[in-house]
Amino acid sequence: MLDSSADTSGTGIGKFLTRAAHWLLHTQEGVLFFIVAAIWVFLTIQSPVFFTGRNIGVLLSQVSMTAITAVGMTILLISGEIDASVGSMQAFVGVVVMSVLNSTSNLALGIVVGLAIGVAVGLINSLISLRLGINSLIATLAMLSIVRGAAFGFTEASIQNTHKIPTFTEIGNGFFLGVPWPIIFFFAVFLIFYFVLSRTTFGRFVHAVGANPEAATLAGIPVRLVKMAGFVLTSVLAAFSAIILLSRLNSGQNGIGAGFELEAIGAVLLGGTSLSGGEGSMVGTFLAVLLLGTLKNGIVLLDINSSWQVAVTGLIIIIAVLLDARRRRRLGQD
Amino acid sequence: MAVLGKGNSGNSVLARGLARWLLTREAGLLILLLAVVVLFWILEPSTRQQRVYWDLLREISPNLIAAIGVTMLMLAGEFDLSIGSMLAVTSVTTVVVFNGTDSMWLGVIAGLATGPIVGSIHGYLVTRQKMNSLVTTLGSLFALRGMVYVYTNKTPIVDENGFYDFQDAYYNNLGPAPLPFVLAIILVALSLIVLTQTEFGRNIYAIGGNETAARVSGIKVNLIKFILFVICASSAAISGMILTMQTGTGYFDSGSSGFELIVIAGVVLGGIALSGGKGSLVGTVLGILILGMTAKGLRLMGVNTNMQLMVTGSIMILAVFMHSFHDRISIFRKR
Amino acid sequence: MPSVQKPLLQLTGIAKAFPGTKALKGVDFSLRAGEVHALIGENGAGKSTLIKIIAGLYQQDAGTIEVEGKKVAFHSPADSLEHRIKVVYQELDLVPDLSIAENVFLGNLPKKALRAVDWQALYSRTSELLLDLGLDIDPEVPISALTVAQQQLVEIARALSRQAQIIIMDEPTSALSQTEIESLFAVIRRLQGRGVGVMYVSHKLDEIYAIADRVTVFRDGEHIATEAVADTRHKDLVTWMVGREVKDLYPRSPAVRGDVLLEVDSLSGGNIENFSLNVHAGEIVAVFGLMGSGVHNLGRLIFGDMPRAGSVRLSGEEIQAQSPMDAIRKGLGFLTENRKSDGLLLPLSVKDNITLVSVNNYANLMVINGQEERRATTDIIKKLSIKTPGIAQRIRYLSGGNQQKSLVGRWLLEDLKVLMFSEPTRGIDVGSKAEIYRLMDDMAHQGMGILVLSTELPEVMGIADRIIIIRQGKSAGRWISRQEANEQDLMTAATVQMEKVI
């Protein structure tokens, strides 16, 4: 009775199939997996180009920036907070890093400065939200404006690449063993934080402070510190995304990244992470990012008016949330 | 109060009333607004002309009108992030119907009708399907904008008939006051009466304050929320109409540079709680005016357009901090 | 006493099922004019489901509702209110930021022409209603400025504002002090005199003897008995509720008293002033106080969840103020009185809830050893016989008793010296109660010290070796052993004025 696997009958493959069916039909991840798989099959039939190594590489490289930021955002949302400032980070980190590289030609220094901006903004976000007690959505929306302003204050025009460091160009455009670097970064970040979230005490604490901060405090968990780590992590990963983006664009642009925050947060929510904290899924985020990327890719391949990208993104978010709402009602979770 | 002494009782009542009012949220915001005006008066000579303020009121009218709907919806504890995209939907619809029917009135009616249509969809999804309004309207922010892109192929639609009456409505005045501002004030006044003096309005506060309590008291929560989604999208449609008057074109990117964020910023600055049930429309108006005046003043000073964002963000943090401080004081006062 | 006539409210054969459970299996209930009819039962007996059906929040699957002999169907709360039925809920359903008057007339504001609110009528009618209930207060004040007892009266005023003839009270006294309960009862008797029928839902048997005319008992969704209160013995009620005779609810057996473990010296903070106590190994010490006495704050102060003055030592070591983390590290655990808001992580699994505090013990460099964690969890589940389909089950789906046992399990996995229980058995069924008490006894026998903070007199009398009374934040009497304490003395010491004791 007390065995955790007591609810399934049969053995071996039967058990596995029952569980797989349950996952597909009863979880947000399953629904997403189903949609992604269906679209992949459809696109493979419709376009000979879709299911080629090259195209999949392009698809995954394109979503890698959103994905890396969304990984941090998943953790932050589970801890019960949010960061809307990641869009402006793309611009601010980009212009600063490019100008540091131009003036020092030191790649390591540039990257360190970029990530340090992430740490700093994350600390400011957590200070405003946790110390001043301002709702983090409002606090980071304000920071969205402030950081964007800082990017414009830093430079009035875009900053071109004059340092010509070859390794820098590799970050966003190079390959390692035939796999584009952005994909390697994306998968590495995803796997590391999937592990952190599900297998470490920090991951457990993130869930706990999001589910019930008072209970977490009484269990001796440093609630503010855990949330602060979430803010800093999200901001640093956003800065990392910005560096990859910078390498791909090959110039620091102060206007880039508008709406990036909506895409990242949208992906996390689409992946089944709850706005109210305590619940979420890294795999769901992964699948959601994949779904959004596939749609964009498919629209290009099928030679559909590229304006559809935006519309379809919106419709998919609505459909996924609708399916989730219906599933919850069916299971009586309200 | 003891300081006021016995003296003239009429006077002391007045003074006491004033003292009490000074502790309200609105008084704090009014003082902040005056401070912003005085600051620019000192720093930038061009703000010393009356014309500047009339211009400001004209430009800020679309924000004010959209903020009415957002305020009502947020008071009931729900959100609409899609209002920026609504501007483009209205704008494009209006001019497309202008060109298709050669009738100004049909165009205006069609443009305004987009509000109730989109609002009904939101209302249905949130109240019937129990979807989270923040995520749902985030979805429609993309969906609506995308459909406008697809339809227009990202080219502005020119009003072939050149309906000057239509455009004049934006630039004309009623006495000294710009017409769009007059419209905004009328809508604000009406909404204020609804919110403070009718049962419908009080029920909005009740829903935002404690939805279960409202439900068990026989208030039709779902119906009211549905109506509020319609009101919110409709007020955004009116804003979209005014912006279309300004340019006379159906613009696919209307409201795409964070219109929803600016309006929500103004509403929050005005003291509407994110959790609903708290705040007033007067606060919203002041919040929008503070943000508008700040942006305008900085623009006149020749500050980088986007540096204004930084100032706006800082003001927002300051204001929200002020509100939480105010909440603490008022709890203290009660005890 | 009520004359024989058509009942105000007659429920017949009401049934209601939810996915996985049958909450009500065809129950009957009737309420006459001018009667107080108590409904009692354990958690899960179906009381709250029945209330929600009467309130129009749920629709019954089978059975009929009759009001004054006429069959009715409730599709929404509005329908129920229409028939002048008003529920006064346990968790107060008031809107904190609206005025008292707006709350009293919520959903039913008096109106002038053009549907505008008639504020004058609103305020004057509210004042009248409140004065009638003995509450002289400005109706324009927001609800959040009132005490819980005052809010309760506002709820009742709300019922009166709709001329309710049927008032349903769901555990109305759970947050009230003794004096406040007395005045609530006075109000109920006045309502009774006016011919209002009151359905009084409670689990406090004493209150039922004090106020009710008839009593109905539900168990597991079934109707067990309806009797006149005067003809019913206390023991019968308990047997009906539980379904068997509860013999050994309090299995306390003497244990060896060891060294002093917890020493609290001149503790102040909140409404607590200069409170001292100590707990020895092998001992169960109870602090008893009424609602509002500060008995609950005591736990938070000792544990460091509230700012405090004074010293708290565990085995001689000082525990830092405002640091639950330090308290836990030194061997102190704390279960609060609010299981949901302070204890449970509702979206998480039974396992994650149980190992919340001890998870570091199964981790190496922050990486959790899943196997070890699962084994520890399974052991606890077996040891406490927690009923769950598996360790991965979300805790929100467990019953109150099993949730509480899981929270006890959370602390058992730590190597504690002293465990504090605030209201250890609030809102759980008698069966689980007995198990919790048995666990406490076990822990004491293993050399732990147990501190119980409670507002339940029978519990304190049944389980504690020593009893301390707290009144208005101060110590108000100590009993060295359970044997020498009697109910009368304890209650008198805990009550501010020497007033009638139930």
Image (cartoon, coloured by chain):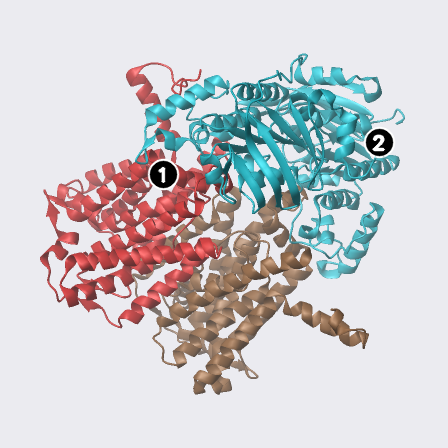
Chain colours: A red, B brown, C cyan
Which structural element holds mark 2? loop
Q: Distance between the residues labelled 1 and 2?
A: 58 Å
Q: Which mark is residue C33?
A: 2
Q: Residue at x 57, y 24 (%)?
A: C401
In this rendering, the answer to whether C15 lies above or below A146 is above
Observer able to see residue B61 = no
In this rendering, the answer to whether B156 lies above or below A1 is below
**Image quadrant in which the N terminus of chain C is located:** top right
Please tell me which residue lies in front, A119 or C321.
Answer: C321
Circle 2 packing at 10 Å, graded few (<14), some (14-19), many (20+), is many
Q: What residue type is labelled 2?
A: Ala
Please tell me which residue lies in front, B45 or B257.
Answer: B45
- Where residue A228 appears, as percent x and y from the top left, is 39, 50
Q: Which amino acid does label 1 sit on?
A: Gly
Q: Which chain carries label 2?
A: C
In this rendering, the answer to whether C209 lies above or below C291 is above
- Where residue B212 appears, as percent x and y from the top left, is 62, 43
Of the two numbered discs 1 and 2 in the rendering, the one whose residue sits closer to the viewer: 1
On the picture, is C275 further left or further right than A191?
A: right
On the picture, is C151 further left or further right than B264?
A: right
Identify the residue position indicated by label 1 in the image: A203
